Amino acid sequence: MDNNLFNLDEINEIIDQNRDPYRKEIGDRVMIDDYSSCTHMNGMELDSEQDEEMQFNTLSHFIVVNDRQRHSFDAYYKKYNQDLIIVNPLTNKQFRINSGHVKLK
C-alpha cells in the first residue's frame, strides 16, 4: 500500500502556476491569495481560530514593509522562501510570506 496520499509533483506544479510573478516592493498594498507560506514573525504557523484578521476578506489589505528577505518555512509538503514582511495597517501586526502568494491591490 502506498503511504503517500498526495502526488507532490502535481501539488508543486499547481502551486507554481498560481504564483503572482509581479515584484512587490516596500510600501506596496497587497492582498493575500495563498496563506500556505504565511507565518507570524517568530515563524509560528497561523491559527485560523486565533488569527481572525487573516481570514479571506476582500476588504483587508496589507502593506509590504520589508522585501528581499531570506526566511525558510517548511510547510510539510513544500519549503517556501518567505521573502516579504507585510503588516496589517489596522493592527500593526507583521507577518512573513512568500511574495508569490500576495498580489498587488
Image (cartoon, rainbow, N blue to C red):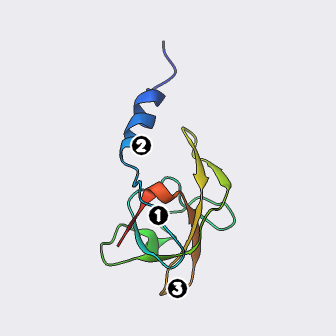
Going by the numbered disc 2, the residue's amino acid type is Ile
Quadrant position of the C terminus in the picture: bottom left
Going by the numbered disc 1, the residue's amino acid type is Ser
Q: Position of residue 14 (x, y in %)?
A: 37, 39
Q: Where does label 1 land, which residue?
A: 48
Eye-nearest disc, 3 or 1? 3
Image: 89 above or below 79? below
Q: Spatial distance from mark 1 to mark 2, Cα to Cα?
A: 21 Å
Residue at 67% across, 56% down? 71
Q: Position of residue 93 (x, y in %)?
A: 57, 79
Q: Where does label 2 land, which residue?
A: 15
Q: Position of residue 73 (x, y in %)?
A: 63, 51
Residue 91, numbered label = 3
Residue at 49% across, 16% down? 2
Residue 79, numbered label = none
Image: 80 above or below 12? below
Eye-nearest disc, 1 or 2? 2
Q: Is residue 74 left or right of residue 101?
A: right
Give the SS element for disc 1. Answer: loop
Residue toward you, 68 or 95 = 68
Residue toward you, 105 or 47 = 105
